[in-house]
Image (tube, rainbow, N blue to C red):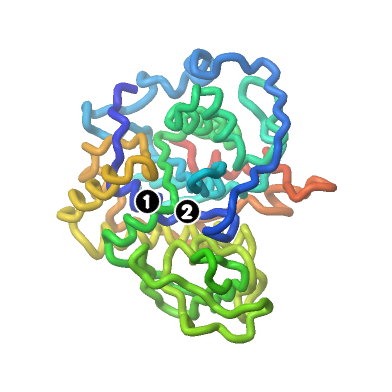
Amino acid sequence: MGISRRRSWLTALMLSAIITGAGSMAGPVSAAPFKFNAGAWLDVAGAVDDVFPFINSASRVIAGPNALSYNGKLTVLLLGSDWRPNSGERLDTIMVMSIDSSKRIKAVSIPRDSARIPIYTGGTYNGKINGMFKYFKAQAGGSRNGGLDRFRLEVEYLLGINIDYLAYVRFSGFDALVDRVDHVTVNIPYELRDPSFIDKPGWPTGAKFLAGSSQLGGGNEPRCYGGYPKPVTNWGPVMNCHRAIVYVRSRHGKLVGCCGNSDYKRAARQQKFVYEAIHRVTGEYNSSIVSGLRQTANNNSASIYTTIPASSDLELWNKLRNSNFSSSSDSKVFAPPTYAHHIGGTSSNELNLTAIRNLCNSWFDDN
């Protein structure tokens, strides 16, 4: 589309909200083996324009070389990676967020355990969706950016929508960005107790977040730990965690007075955190913070990447300023029974394509 693929400060901050993983910062990633039936799959890069003519620049509204490019609604694919040194990599957070002309934000999350994903050229990816990027990266000759763009095309096809840009972040990028803005204030509706989370290898497991308004920080915050052994009876010296990365990655334990914690619960927390991060920058700061966030993103190029042009920072800031988002009416996690069903004998779910495409067409259609 003729747009420089550099890191945009605001998208980078949005990214910082969505990091998630297997519930622990420690230990290797053991990605489950997958089976792939590509059918007519040959050269995705060469076939893209034929299969998806709507991604061509001619169908976009481009006001100038440094402007954002979108029709009607600006839609971004937000991806959180659980990459660790000497280990594998999975995209355990897959979120689509869009803002329309009335400044209303909508968000959906695709659970990492979703499987049997249809491929736009034909065939089915039978493994979990969080492993698809690794496959596409290999097909792109080891190119991270090429693999991410192929993954974006698949999410477009899966949901039946246009996605204008993508953004990707790893753990260290998350911590650095949240540190740059000092903190993000969130309202925690129920006390969260996760006895399994490992925030630092060799430390006791467990993390707890008290209910109420809380200022969550980045890598400069004290590490969180609770009691040992499980089940937790003594929560140790860190009684109330303030590390944002733990809050958006926790998936075990319980929400006191509510229900059990889960992948679906953390996906909903991630959506709300993204909005609060946007609010923190566009509402409580001003445009002078642009240069600092951009510098942080550029200094962490291995862990932060987006296709939004950096030169559009101010335009994006103005578009997102005074935006609105309701977690009860503007967000969905594609969980059973409405949006997916369990695949017997596995830990995976198969998405209900009719249900998710109908919703996404209503929420993200460009018209």
Q: Residue furthest left?
A: 288
Identify residue type, mark 1. Answer: Gly
Say if residue 79 shows up in the picture.
yes
Identify residue type, mark 2. Answer: Ile
Quadrant holding the N terminus: top left
Quadrant holding the C terminus: top left
Q: Which mark is residue 19?
A: 2
142 is higher (above) or lower (below) than 257: above
| Residue at 56% from the left image edge and 31% from the top image edge | 154
Question: Residue 13: image x %, image y %?
Answer: 34, 52
> Could you tell which of marks 1 and 2 lies nearer the N-terminus?
2
Say if residue 81 shows up in the picture.
no
Q: Secondary structure at mark 2?
A: loop
Spatial CA span between label 1 and label 2: 9 Å
What residue would you read off at disc 1? 173
Q: Secondary structure at mark 1?
A: helix
Q: Quadrant of residue 56?
A: top left
Bin the neighbour count of mark 1 within 10 Å (Cα to Cα): few under 14, some 14-19, many 20 and up: many
Front residue of this view, candidates 142 and 291 = 142
Q: Are marks 1 and 2 in contact (CB under 8 Å)?
A: yes
